[in-house]
Image (tube, grey):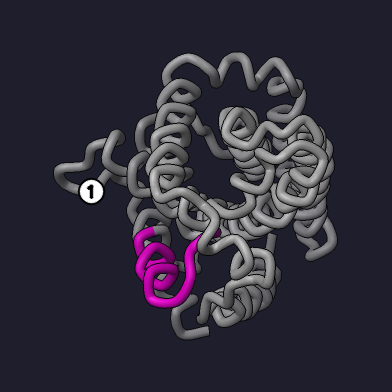
Amino acid sequence: MSNVHYERELKRLILKEKRFIASRKNHKESVVNRFLADKVPEKISETMNTAFSKAFSLIFDKGTSIIEKTYKKDELEKDFQVDLYSARIRGTGKSLKKLSNKADIAGGVNLAVSGVSGIGMGLLGMGLPDIPVFTAMILRCIYEIAIRYGFSYETEEEKYFILLLIEGAVSYGKHLEEINKKIDDYIDNPMLPVGYRRSQQIVNTSRVLSTELLYMKFLQGVPIVGAVGGAYDVIYMNNISKYSRMKYKKRFLLNYSKEITITDIKNI
């Protein structure tokens, strides 16, 4: 495919990324969060942080194969190869967008499932018990996006990348900018940082998640009314899905373009 199409897609993608980051420059607490601010016990935050950390560790160590049973991995991988071949042969922007569209559809399906699950848990007053389920849904969504763009998710390096994606997607301001740079550095050179420990990155990601979802998960623990808190699963899943699709697409475009580098796109 001509690099003209890759560059055109990259220009659109960079603008999209900039808008995403600009939209999260400041963190404005919702009316619900402000209402619940003085009603949530202090220990809940640490309890949530621990719950997310345990969920990530368990899924990475033993749960990925279970998640893979919820979609047809082999078929998705073959589908990607067919679409990639088509994009190379036809050499058009339309064939390139086909890959993106399928990743978008995968994200949409996972949004719907997370919404049903979150609301259902909320109706039953299950906030903290929803965390392992929600974590599994997040990873399922990212796994499918990764496959749609031709990437693995099993290696230690890819788990680091995934944890950064989740942390970045629910961050704001300077912290988001810092994580975004780490992600772009990884895309440029997919290696683990010196001294990296997965357990520490899991803690970092879990802390940001638990802080962001604190009030909603607390509210989700109240029967019936908790459906409102559970519905917010869709909002957070949407941000994670959107951000992950942008970053995997960037990796794909750079990987399959022989001439464009991440240094080039910084000037776009």
Examine the structure image and report whether residue 177 is included in the region drawn in magenta: yes
Say whether residue 244 is left or right of residue 106. Answer: left
Residue in the foreground of this view, choosing between 108 and 235? 235
Seen as rendered, the residue at the extreme left is: 195
Residue beneath disc 1: 193
Q: Can residue 207 be seen in this view?
A: yes
User: Dot 1: what SS?
Assistant: loop
**Residue that appears at 74% across and 20% down:** 70
> What is the three-letter code of the residue carrying label 1?
Pro
- Tell me the magenta residue range: 170-182
**Residue that appears at 53% across and 52% down:** 214
**Residue that appears at 65% across and 75% down:** 16
Percent position of residue 6, x then y: 64, 67
Residue in the foreground of this view, choosing between 61 and 214? 214
Say whether residue 54 is left or right of residue 246. Answer: left
Examine the structure image and report whether residue 5 is included in the region drawn in magenta: no
Quarter of the figure with residue 122: top right
Q: Please say if 72 is above or below 23.
A: above
Classify mark 1: residues with Cα within 10 Å, few (<14), some (14-19) or many (20+).
Answer: few
Quarter of the figure with residue 133: top right
User: In the rendered view of the protein, which quadrant contains the N terminus?
Assistant: bottom right
Q: Can residue 106 be seen in this view?
A: no
- The chief SS type of the magenta part is helix
Say whether residue 94 is left or right of residue 249. Answer: right
Figure label count: 1
Residue in the foreground of this view, choosing between 140 and 152? 140
Percent position of residue 232, x then y: 72, 53
